[in-house]
Amino acid sequence: MANDKLVEQKLKSLQTAITVALSFIILLSVGVSTVMFTQTYRLGQDSARFQERTKEAHAALWAFKVDLEKRHANGLEFLREHPNGIPGITAAELQRAINTQKATLDALGILNCRET
């Protein structure tokens, strides 16, 4: 009988330990899940803000590109009309400005102005 009582106490003790361990695991799981949910929610918000900023930057670059295309075309026309430059601005300086505009336009060539 004493042996049965000892076994019963050990089983109860083991049961309590298992219950405590499982409770701890459940609480830990809930805590980790809460942190993961919170971080996922924040990432979603950050992603939405990032997408909005990306659209704004794309629109600004597009506007810059369109303006630069006009200025580049006007510069080419101006140089054709004034092949020797004008007083104070040589043809070489005009050509350098046009070349710089063309290089910038080439760099902006990756922009698809229909995407926004």
Image (tube, rainbow, N blue to C red):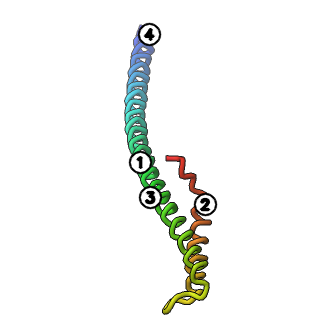
Q: Residue furthest front?
A: 81
Question: Residue flagged by tag 4: what amino acid is it?
Answer: Asp
**Which residue position holds label 4?**
4
Q: Secondary structure at mark 4?
A: helix
Tell me the distance, in whole angstroms, between the alpha carbons under discs 3 and 4.
83 Å
Q: Nearer the viewer, residue 14 or 10?
A: 14
**In this figure, which residue is indicated by the disc labeled 1?**
52
Residue at point 57% right, 83% down?
Answer: 82
Q: Which residue is mark 3?
A: 60
Q: Nearer the viewer, mark 3 or mark 4?
A: 3
**Which class describes the residues within 10 Å of circle 2: few (<14), some (14-19), or many (20+)?**
few
Look at the numbered discs 2 and 3 and tell me whether their residues touch, using CB distance below 8 Å: no
Query: What's the distance in space between the residues labelled 2 and 3, CA to CA?
Result: 14 Å
Q: Is residue 49 above or below residue 19?
A: below
| Disc ID at residue 17 | none
Please report the residue visible at 56 percent of the width from the left and 72 percent of the height from the top.
Answer: 101
The answer to whether mark 3 and mark 4 are in CB contact below 8 A is no
Q: Identify the element where label 1 is drawn.
A: helix
Q: Quadrant of the N terminus?
A: top left
Residue type at mark 2: give it.
Answer: Gly
**Label 1 packing within 10 angstroms: few (<14), some (14-19), many (20+):** few
Residue that label 2 marks: 109
Crowding at dot 4, Cα within 10 Å, few <14 / some 14-19 / many 20+, comes out as few
